Amino acid sequence: CEIDEVVVQFARDYFPRQTKALQDPRVKLRVQNAVSYVQEARYPIARAANGTFDAILIDSTDFNQAEPLFTTAFYNDCKQLLSPGGILSFNLDSPQWGQVRVATASEQMSRLFRNAFIFQVYQPTYASGHYAFMFASDDVHPFKTAPDWGAFAKKRIPTRYYNPDLHYASFLLPTQLQTVLHGVPRLSQMAPGVFPRYDVAGVLQWPISHENV
């Protein structure tokens, strides 16, 4: 969903490389308020007609500009649209400058999902360079559910930041952040066989598995 059609057209005109994905036949772009969309889509008749989602990713605007996107009701509506094993993830704030917001989201989501954890990234565009996101799922745990690293390796995606090691490291948070969050995953929780394996040349070796522990 994108609430402003002008933004979409502007992006198509001036950022053609970034908007190339919109031409993919699998993409269905809705120019609509996301709040109203999930409210309508969560009803059984709508779910039967349109299906559910394996993942819902929310890249929302500033908190004071889009307050309905940060309510428990909205997140609960999103949860109703997730398929079994589905995940919800969204941007938060700087853990340094917006620690209260990050901690509030941690508590908020822990009441809705069995697994609700903050993960961190380092990027050049937001204040402090240190930024936090939310990961939430009833069925998937970042340290107990094995990703399909075999499929990831076969795609040979030339990433510059992301890799299997960083995937897990992003959930390991500084002490000052751990102390204000509702829950954090620990390395001691890592299930056997979940961590990625490499051969002597550093090439990822991983049997295809979707097993949840």
Image (cartoon, helix red, strand yellow):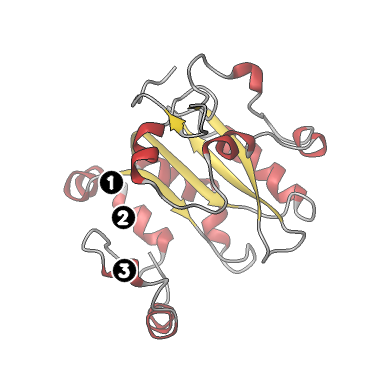
User: Considering the image in quadrants, where does the N terminus appear?
Assistant: bottom left
User: Considering the image in quadrants, where does the C terminus appear?
Assistant: top left
The percent coordinates of residue 114 (x first, y second) are 51, 27
Q: Quadrant of residue 29?
A: bottom left
Mark 3 lies on a secondary structure that is helix
State the residue in front, 185 or 58: 185
Query: Against 1, is 205 above or below?
Result: above
The numbered dot on residue 16 is none
Circles 1, 2 touching at the beta carbon (< 8 Å) = yes
Query: Against 111, is 58 above or below?
Result: below
The residue that label 1 is drawn on is 43
Say left or right for 190 vs 16: right
The residue that label 2 is drawn on is 40
Q: Could one spot residue 148 in this view of the protein?
A: no
Amino acid, disc 1: Tyr
- Looking at marks 2 and 3 on the same chain, the residue that comes earlier in the sequence is marked by 3
The numbered dot on residue 22 is 3
State the residue in front, 188 or 176: 188
Q: Which dot, 2 or 3, sits closer to the camera?
A: 3
Mark 2–mark 3 Cα distance, whole angstroms, equals 23 Å
Check disc 3: other Cα within 10 Å, few if <14, some if 14-19, many if 20+: some
